Image (cartoon, helix red, strand yellow):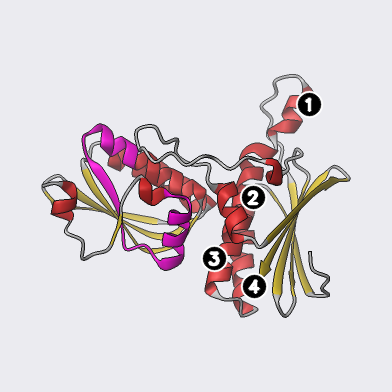
Amino acid sequence: MANVDPKAYERSFFSSLEDIALICDWLEKLLTELSISSTKVFHSQLCVQEILSNIYEYGCPYYEDNQGQGSTTSHVCKITLTVKLSSDRLIIVIVDDSRPYNLLETKIKLIDKKLETAVPGGHGIRLIKKYADNINYCYKNNENQITLEFIL
Amino acid sequence: MLMTVQEIEDQVTKIILSGKLDINGSLEIDKDFMDTIKSKKYVIVDMAEVSFIMSLGMRTLVSGAKEVAKNGGKLVICNPQSNVEDALRESSIDTLLPIVDSNTDLKKLFGL
């Protein structure tokens, strides 16, 4: 990642659909106010939403499993999203306390060109890797930290 | 996310989507979309007013295309905005369901 000293904006929220909708609206409004191009707003929104979608869908049951009781009690993860902007790049950091998940180690789904056999969905990682110029992942203090960098 | 259904010709249905196929929009529309699709044969999904799509929204479109294919039909995507079209093509969705514009001869495309 580049060494930058950007302006930073931060929000913390929970992995509920309501919170995710609010934070995505906030992010879009912020990036538009910061004069980021509509295409970069689209790309960064897409990457963030794919990651939040993964956390919402797969990130939280880990804690139910750990209880070892087959509990269906839902756990809501805490997520912090930080936006940093410098003159030539946009950096978005997503920190969450869901189960460890390194998207950099996830294999990109093979493309099936036959409708009969194609399995719908599963293109999120491909799109993140396509649209983010750099991606970093680490797991520390029981939290996932994903850093997305977009060159402006 | 809004969805409007128009029967435009015998066996041809146009579904007009409007809004964002983001996490909430995709989940919001998925059931209605699939319920509408399952009895249809030839479907045009007009996406001119869709400003955002992510993989969840693409899953809905591909699931719909598979459903109409069971009826011997076809689903096409019409007039997507440039960023939306780019994301669809990056995911190779265009190899599964055609992306067309409003000038495309749909009768010919559907083999009618």
Give me the C-alpha separation between circle 1 and circle 3.
37 Å
**The disc label shown at residue A51, or none:** 2
Secondary-structure class at tag 1: helix
**Which label belongs to residue A42?**
3
Residue located at (75% from left, 41% from top): A98
* Spatial separation of the CA atoms under disc 2 and disc 4: 19 Å
| Left or right: residue B102 compared with residue A103 | left
Q: Position of residue A147 (x, y in %)?
A: 74, 58
Q: Amino acid at mark 3?
A: Phe
Q: Residue B70: name its quadrant.
A: top left
Magenta residues span B65-92
Badge 4 and badge 3 in a common chain: yes
* Residue A90, visible in the rendered structure: yes
Subunit under mark 3:
A
Question: Which of the marked residues, 1 or 4, is nearer the chain's N terminus?
Answer: 4
Name the residue at 23% across, 64% down: B102
Residue A30 numbered mark, or none: 4
Q: Return the residue found at the far right.
A: A141
Amino acid type assigned to the residue bearing label 2 in the image: Ile
Mark 3 or mark 2: name the one nearer the start of the chain. 3
Q: Nearer the viewer, mark 4 or mark 3?
A: 3
Point 39% across, 43% down: residue: B62
Mark 2 falls within which chain? A
**Residue A66, numbered circle:** 1
Q: Position of residue A77 (x, y in %)?
A: 73, 44
Please name the residue shown 56% across and 76% down the image.
Answer: A37
Q: Is residue B60 magenta?
A: no
